[in-house]
Amino acid sequence: MNILRFCKNWTLPIAMAMGVILYFVYVNIPFLAPTKPFVAHAIDIVQPVLIFLMLFLTFCKINVHDLKLCAWHWRLLLIQGASFLLLGLLLVIFPDFSDRILVEGAMICLICPTATAAAVVTRKLGGDAAHLTTYTILVNLLAAILVPLVLPLVHPHPELNFGSSFALILGKVFPLLLCPFLAAILLRALLPKVHAKLGQYHELSFYLWAVALTLAIGVTVKSIVHSDVSFWYQAGLGGVSLVCCALQFYFGKKIGRRYDDSISSGQALGQKNTVFAIWMGYTFFTPVTAVAAGFYSVWHNVVNSYQLYLQRKSEGESDALKN
């Protein structure tokens, strides 16, 4: 039990370390070299499947009647959508922009939907998990629309027109972000007993996330190793993701404070589904931009760890005063 508790408490660093270690072990075993094309193809299939299953199991625990719309949802959606569009417009107007990779890294960090685990953290911090879950669904919808619209303009394919590129990207993004919710709703309506049973295993999404993160970090390391981008640009991506993380937590909490819901709003805008962001980076953007999402995974977990520490400290002081 102690080992399991340790692994769960330190899943982020363990998964990231495993991704790095497994990559270097695998590429340095000579007789495995012929399997590299098959492994790369398998990861291309497994990664989106894991993202789908994580969201599906999370949404199976949701009761539609508990979902609540509130004013801060629209403000946060405007921040994410407008910032993504403005940075995309910058790259469309200036296609040879010298710091293009840094801008792409910021775009990934800004449009990335809310993490599936954000509701758990929000509940522990005393926020409204229902408000956050509603926002998660809304921002998934926003990302599913904006990413296919903007990416063909930012990264035009020489052999495809806008419509073909839009359809291709939509076909990859839409099933990952919206189909899990639709599938969970249909399952509740058609097979309520199966839905209830799956709802009992929603914590399985945590372990799927760990596997997906390990694969994502491995792919990110591959992008770094094989990239022609300088070390300073890659360090710059880490800096960009830190700025994006700090600003999103700040504005999320500031906007939420107006509606007495700063915790939920802060987590909704600041805590990201970084596995999806990493996948989006190496699938649609310049592959090395996935580094920004990898760093973001560290930054938002540092913020969450500090917030949870303050919450435990506050609860401890309250208990001491009662006694």
Image (cartoon, rainbow, N blue to C red):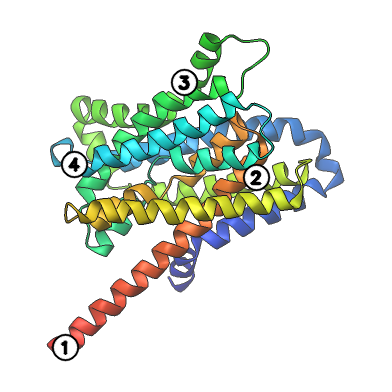
**Spatial separation of the CA atoms under disc 2 and disc 1:** 48 Å
Q: Nearer the viewer's eye, disc 4 or disc 2?
A: 4
Residue on which disc 3 sits: 149
**SS type, badge 4:** helix
Please name the amino acid that badge 3 sits on.
Leu
Which of the two discs, 2 and 3, labels the residue nearer the N terminus?
A: 3
**Spatial separation of the CA atoms under disc 3 and disc 4:** 26 Å
Which of the two discs, 1 and 4, labels the residue nearer the N terminus?
A: 4
In this image, 215 relative to 98: left or right? Answer: left
The numbered disc on residue 224 is none
The numbered disc on residue 71 is 4
Image coords of residue 7 (percent x, y): 49, 65
Observer-nearest of 295 and 171: 295
Which of the two discs, 2 and 1, labels the residue nearer the N terminus?
A: 2
In this image, 235 relative to 293: left or right? Answer: right
**SS type, badge 2:** helix
Residue on which disc 1 sits: 321
**Spatial separation of the CA atoms under disc 2 and disc 3:** 25 Å
Residue on which disc 2 sits: 220
